[in-house]
């Protein structure tokens, strides 16, 4: 009996041991399945890249306006963007028609960027600001690039004087440069007043200031008498000659950049020097600031009273061409800027040297037609 009991106890112990061993083996296999192999373990953190993240080396925008001749005007909003060390400049332009709150009928038109044109056709528009078309373009950068914008809309508009303008046109240019503009710069230039000898001679007096800055010894009256092309006030294209004599208080309506460029180059060719005058018409204000930062004063067409907009007071037809005579326009010399204060410094023949809000200057400069001359 004792012999059988011992056998039974031994069998039970064997069964218990086998069960414990089996359970342990199953747990071990389960742990082996849950433990990921070394190759699939969380990767070691990588060393940070030595190259800094790329940033925009050009990121700017601006506005180009048609001349403010009527209550219907074109407005081109442009932008440019470039990543440093990459060769592509990304350009975009949106063209708007600004009108009174009335129905406006217009025809076809185009936007051009660096000579590449996108044409469009408009529909009847209602409201004060209408998007006509948008255009995007990528160009290869060559370092210091001049980007030219141009736009046109086939439309008939009536001026306040009752004259009809056929078509609206606007053009301008912008500098695509990765060189940072200095925060401020001021040119020391001797101011010259046009009074009393030249009561309507702001253009030629501004030129006299710049020539004297370049170390030429020339009087404003001598410059006007000998080098400025003139014509009868009401029969002269202001792009070809001064309309009237700057010595006259009345019946003298001034001139535009080509006339001042011609007078300057005529003077330099006779008096010697390696300088040359050129028209900067259509260029954005940033381009003018870059010249000032290089100690090059810029003759600009702006306003006599900056609180008021320029306007057309007379329209002339000369040799089949429409010539607009504008009021509240004054030519002066841009000699400084301050990007932090957002001001520009101007030497005006009408008054003296003064500082002006940069945004206001840029608005009036654009409204007059973005007209400027530099001597380099």
Image (cartoon, rainbow, N blue to C red):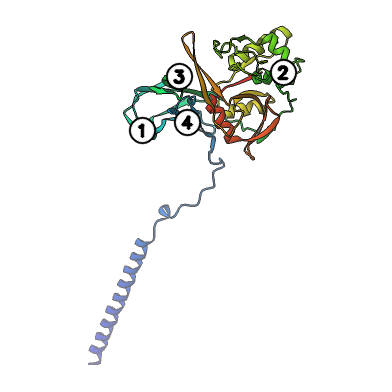
Q: Left or right: where does residue 103 sit relative to residue 264?
A: left
Residue that badge 1 annotates: 102
Residue 85 percent across, percent down from the top left: 54, 32
Of residues 321 and 211, the one drawn nearer to the viewer in this rendering = 321
Residue 154 percent across, percent down from the top left: 38, 21
User: Residue most toward the bottom?
Assistant: 1
Residue that badge 3 annotates: 115
Badge 4: how crowded within 10 Å, few (<14), some, or many (20+)?
A: many
Of residues 113 and 189, the one drawn nearer to the viewer in this rendering = 189
Q: Are marks 4 and 3 in contact (CB under 8 Å)?
A: no
In 3D space, how far apart are the residues under numbered discs 4 and 3 (Cα atoms)?
15 Å
Residue that badge 4 annotates: 78
Mark 4 against mark 3, which lies toward the viewer?
Answer: 4
Please tell me in which quadrant of the rendered image residue 28 appears.
bottom left
Mark 1 against mark 4, which lies toward the viewer?
Answer: 1
Residue 41 percent across, percent down from the top left: 43, 55
In 3D space, how far apart are the residues under numbered discs 1 and 3 (Cα atoms)?
33 Å
């Amino acid at each position: 009996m004792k012999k059988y009991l011992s056998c039974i106890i031994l069998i039970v112990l064997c069964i218990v041991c086998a069960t414990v061993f089996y359970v342990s083996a199953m747990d071990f296999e389960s742990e082996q399945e849950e433990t990921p192999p070394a190759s699939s373990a969380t990767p070691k953190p990588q060393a940070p890249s030595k190259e800094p993240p790329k940033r925009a080396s050009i990121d700017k925008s601006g506005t180009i306006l048609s001349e403010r001749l009527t209550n219907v005007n074109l407005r081109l909003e442009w932008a440019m963007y470039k990543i440093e060390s990459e060769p592509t400049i990304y350009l975009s332009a949106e063209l708007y028609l600004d009108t009174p709150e009335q129905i406006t009928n217009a025809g076809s038109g185009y936007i051009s960027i660096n000579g590449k044109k996108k044409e469009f056709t408009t529909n009847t528009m209602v409201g004060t600001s209408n998007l006509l078309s948008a255009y995007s373009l990528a160009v290869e950068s060559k370092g210091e690039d001049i980007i030219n914008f141009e736009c046109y809309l086939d439309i008939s508009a009536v001026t306040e004087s009752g004259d009809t303008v056929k078509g609206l046109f606007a053009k301008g240019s912008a500098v695509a440069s990765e060189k940072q503009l200095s925060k401020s710069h001021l040119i020391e230039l001797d101011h010259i007043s046009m009074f009393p000898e030249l009561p309507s001679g702001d253009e030629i007096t501004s030129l006299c200031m710049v020539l004297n800055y370049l170390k030429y010894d020339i009087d404003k009256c001598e410059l006007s008498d000998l080098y400025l092309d003139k014509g009868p006030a009401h029969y002269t294209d202001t792009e070809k000659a001064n309309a009237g004599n700057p010595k006259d208080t009345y019946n003298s309506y001034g001139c535009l950049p080509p006339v001042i460029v011609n007078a300057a180059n005529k003077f330099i060719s006779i008096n010697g020097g390696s300088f040359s005058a050129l028209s900067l018409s259509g260029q954005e204000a940033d381009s003018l600031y870059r010249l000032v930062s290089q100690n090059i004063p810029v003759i600009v067409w702006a306003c006599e009273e900056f609180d008021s907009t320029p306007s057309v007071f007379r329209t002339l037809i000369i040799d089949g061409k429409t010539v607009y005579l504008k009021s509240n326009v004054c030519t002066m010399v841009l000699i400084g800027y301050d990007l932090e204060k957002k001001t520009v410094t101007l030497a005006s023949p009408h008054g003296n040297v003064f500082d002006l809000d940069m945004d206001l200057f840029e608005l009036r400069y654009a409204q007059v037609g973005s007209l400027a001359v530099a001597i380099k």
